[in-house]
Image: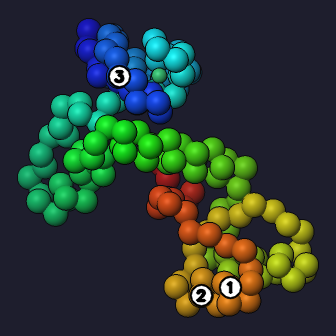
């Protein structure tokens, strides 16, 4: 058995026992792990949970250190809620990669049907879109292109 310090988007913290780390992931994915205070099944390991083991490669350690480690729990949970909101929003959004600027512009000028898309744009492309009045917004969190996901 393994105990995890968990928290929900409202910042409630609680402990829960699982058969293994994998069991936790599995149960959480299926929405079976609930916050005992508000019943939310959007739970994650609390930010103050035991630190990620230090890797021997210092640069890598720096890059993989969770952003939430040194933040007050309220901020960390707000950020997590935002990240989850982004993930939800992107579920109905189409990844267009490097064609983002072109497709956004085409929609703006009515050359193609409107759709929710996300992708990559260079700073110059983004600036040009904004100048033309094309409604775009930066995502608060980096998104891995689908072809880079395992
Ligand atoms: Zn809660």
Q: CA distance from mark 2 to mark 3?
A: 42 Å
Q: Residues within 10 Å of mark 3 (few under 14, many from 20)?
A: many
> Looking at the image, which residue is at 18% across and 54% down?
61
Q: Residue 90 at x, y = what percent? A: 64, 52
Q: CA distance from mark 1 to mark 3?
A: 43 Å
State the image quarter where residue 146 is shown: bottom right
Q: Residue 92 at x, y = what percent? A: 72, 50
Judge whether residue 69 can be spotted in this image: yes
Judge whether residue 148 can be spotted in this image: no
Q: Which residue is mark 2?
A: 127
Mark 2: C-beta under 8 Å from nearest atom of ligand 1: no
Q: Secondary structure at mark 1?
A: helix
* Residue 60 as seen in the image, left or right of residue 9: left
Q: Residues within 10 Å of mark 2 (few under 14, many from 20)?
A: some
Q: Secondary structure at mark 2?
A: helix
Name the mark nearer the viewer: 1 or 3. 3
Query: Relative to residue 17, is residue 70 depicted above or below?
Result: below
State the image quarter where residue 24 is shown: top left
Q: For residue 148, which numbered disc appears in the image?
A: none
Name the residue furthest left. Answer: 56
Q: Residue 64 at x, y = what percent? A: 26, 53
> Looking at the image, which residue is at 83% across and 75% down?
107
> Looking at the image, which residue is at 40% across and 24% down?
12
Say which label, 2 or 3, has the lower sequence index.
3
Name the mark nearer the viewer: 2 or 3. 3
Which one is nearer the viewer's eye here, 26 or 111? Answer: 111
Which quadrant: the N terminus? top left
Q: CA distance from mark 2 to mark 1?
A: 5 Å
Q: Which residue is mark 3?
A: 13
Q: Which residue is mark 1?
A: 129
Tag 1 near tag 3, CB within 8 Å: no
Say which label, 1 or 3, has the lower sequence index.
3
């Amino acid at each position: 058995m393994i105990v995890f310090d968990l928290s929900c988007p409202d910042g409630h913290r609680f402990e829960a026992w699982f058969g293994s780390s994998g069991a936790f992931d599995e149960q959480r994915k299926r929405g079976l792990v609930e916050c005992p205070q508000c019943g939310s099944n959007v739970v994650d390991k609390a930010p103050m949970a035991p630190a990620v083991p230090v890797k021997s490669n210092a640069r890598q350690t720096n890059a993989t250190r969770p952003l939430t480690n040194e933040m007050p729990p309220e901020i960390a949970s707000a950020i997590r809620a935002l990240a989850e909101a982004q993930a939800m929003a992107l579920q109905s959004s189409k990844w267009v990669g490097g064609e983002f600027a072109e497709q956004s512009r085409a929609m703006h000028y009515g050359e193609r049907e409107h759709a929710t898309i996300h992708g990559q744009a260079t700073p110059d492309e983004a600036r040009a879109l904004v100048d033309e009045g094309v409604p775009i917004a930066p995502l608060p969190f980096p998104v891995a292109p689908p072809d880079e996901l395992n």
